[in-house]
Image (tube, rainbow, N blue to C red):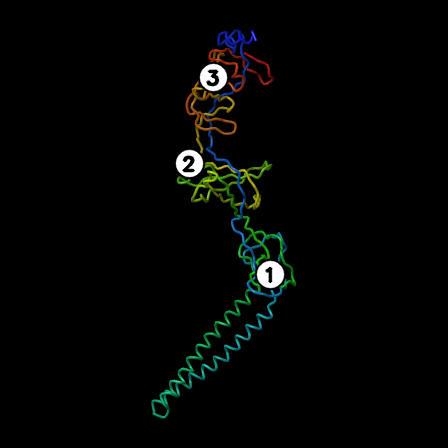
């Protein structure tokens, strides 16, 4: 305990490298380089469009014209249902239309004759009115028949189910021979559009002002990379900012669109997201390990030409995972201590560690 008291009661420099021995330290240089202003997060890949395919009529499934997991094009035929009952219904509707057209034409001719006879006083006004009403009623019947024919044609079209979008099919839920009912709860197949695709993620509420400011200046670039994927991140751009902050989490939902032509991003996948708001072309940068915190704020130890340490207060602009951008306090070319600060006081002599670990003056 006596030794501990003697160390604490001595001069400040004696206990922390201020004596005769040089303090071994590791150093790095302050540099100037472009540095992006980034917001990082974890996102979820979402298809830009997804469709659940349902049948609009009831009938027997006669064919499936794709293999589950296939990429399909918009308009490509996926399923066909039994067309025979629908074709018969269409023929019946067309026959009804032809019959009623003939009856309407005859009724119209009769109405004209009764009008002529009524003008000559041979037919009564009541007979003329009756013939006119019959002609008008048959014309209305013809209109209903035309609608029935059109409806039968539409029903026949429903027997062929085509893809409304281009995308990747999922698991096939039915097979030929099954009876398909109109608007069943279960979909026949799900189609996800993979190219382009979206990535949805949340950013802290505090980042929202910067996001809105830079978004007003132009497009904002987004990078997305699946975990454990060492290749170049996929690039997209910001397309959506939610209209409210989630008060439970203090975050706001945003979304980016990615071309995804290589189908690297897959729906439901978690990805690491980096939003680049802007780039500072002449940022003053040093390693994060050099930054120290004290009662008066942030500071670093700068090595002077005479190999002594100088404590320098600094103003931090922002920091990344490994680097810190300095607004004031150091300049490009300065040498800062990244390891060994605990033994330093202003004026301490230092010896810089070489790569092999030995100290050199």
Q: Which residue is mark 1?
A: 79
State which quarter of the image contains the C terminus.
top right
Q: Residues within 10 Å of mark 1 (few under 14, many from 20)?
A: many
Where residue 121 appears, x then y in whole percent? Answer: 34, 92
Query: Residue, x 44% and y 30% (percent of image)?
Result: 281
- Name which quarter of the figure residue 45 lies in: top right
Q: Which residue is mark 2?
A: 210
Element on which disc 3 rests: strand
Where residue 323 appears, x then y in whole percent? Answer: 50, 27
Are the residues at dot 1 and dot 2 in contact (C-beta closer than 8 Å)? no
Res. 57 mark: none
Where residue 274 appears, x then y in whole percent? Answer: 50, 37
Of the residues under marks 1 and 2, which one precedes in the sequence? 1
Of the residues under marks 1 and 3, which one precedes in the sequence? 1
Determine whether 312 is above or below 42 in the image. above
Q: Left or right: 164 with respect to 130?
A: right
Q: Nearer the viewer, mark 3 or mark 2?
A: 2
Q: CA distance from mark 1 to mark 2?
A: 50 Å
Element on which disc 2 rests: helix
Determine whether 127 is above or below 318 in the image. below
Q: Which residue is mark 3?
A: 302
Where residue 288 appears, x then y in whole percent? Answer: 50, 24
């Amino acid at each position: 305990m006596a030794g501990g008291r003697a160390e604490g009661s001595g001069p400040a420099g004696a206990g922390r490298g201020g004596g005769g021995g040089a303090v071994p330290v590791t150093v790095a240089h302050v540099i100037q380089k472009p540095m992006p202003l980034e917001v990082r997060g974890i996102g979820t890949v979402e298809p830009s469009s997804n469709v659940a395919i349902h049948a609009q009529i009831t009938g027997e499934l006669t064919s499936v014209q794709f293999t589950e997991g296939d990429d399909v094009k918009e308009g490509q035929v996926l399923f066909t249902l039994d067309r025979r009952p629908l074709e018969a219904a269409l023929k019946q509707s067309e026959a009804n239309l032809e019959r009623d057209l003939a009856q309407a034409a005859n009724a119209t001719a009769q109405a004209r004759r009764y009008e002529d006879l009524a003008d000559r006083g041979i037919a009564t006004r009541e007979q003329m009115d009756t013939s006119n009403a019959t002609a008008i009623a048959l014309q209305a019947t013809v209109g209903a028949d035309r609608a029935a024919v059109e409806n039968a044609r539409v029903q026949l079209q429903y027997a062929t189910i085509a893809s409304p979008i281009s995308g990747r099919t999922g698991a096939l839920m039915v097979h030929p021979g099954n009876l398909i009912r109109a608007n069943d709860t279960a979909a026949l197949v799900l189609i996800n559009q993979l190219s382009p695709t979206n990535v949805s993620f949340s950013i802290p509420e505090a980042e929202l002002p910067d996001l809105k400011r830079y978004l007003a200046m132009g497009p904002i670039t987004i990078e997305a990379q699946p975990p454990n994927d060492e290749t170049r991140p996929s690039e997209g751009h910001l397309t959506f900012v939610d209209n409210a902050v989630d008060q439970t989490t203090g975050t706001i939902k945003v979304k980016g669109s990615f071309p995804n032509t290589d189908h690297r991003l897959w729906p439901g996948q978690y990805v690491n997201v980096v939003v680049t708001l802007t780039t500072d072309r002449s940022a003053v940068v040093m390693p994060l390990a050099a930054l120290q915190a004290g009662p008066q704020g942030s500071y670093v130890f700068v090595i002077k030409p005479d190999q002594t340490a100088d404590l320098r207060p600094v103003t931090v602009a922002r920091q990344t995972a490994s680097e810190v951008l300095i607004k004031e306090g150091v300049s490009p070319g300065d040498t800062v201590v990244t390891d060994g600060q605990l033994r330093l006081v202003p004026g301490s002599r230092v010896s810089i560690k070489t790569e092999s670990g030995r100290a050199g003056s």
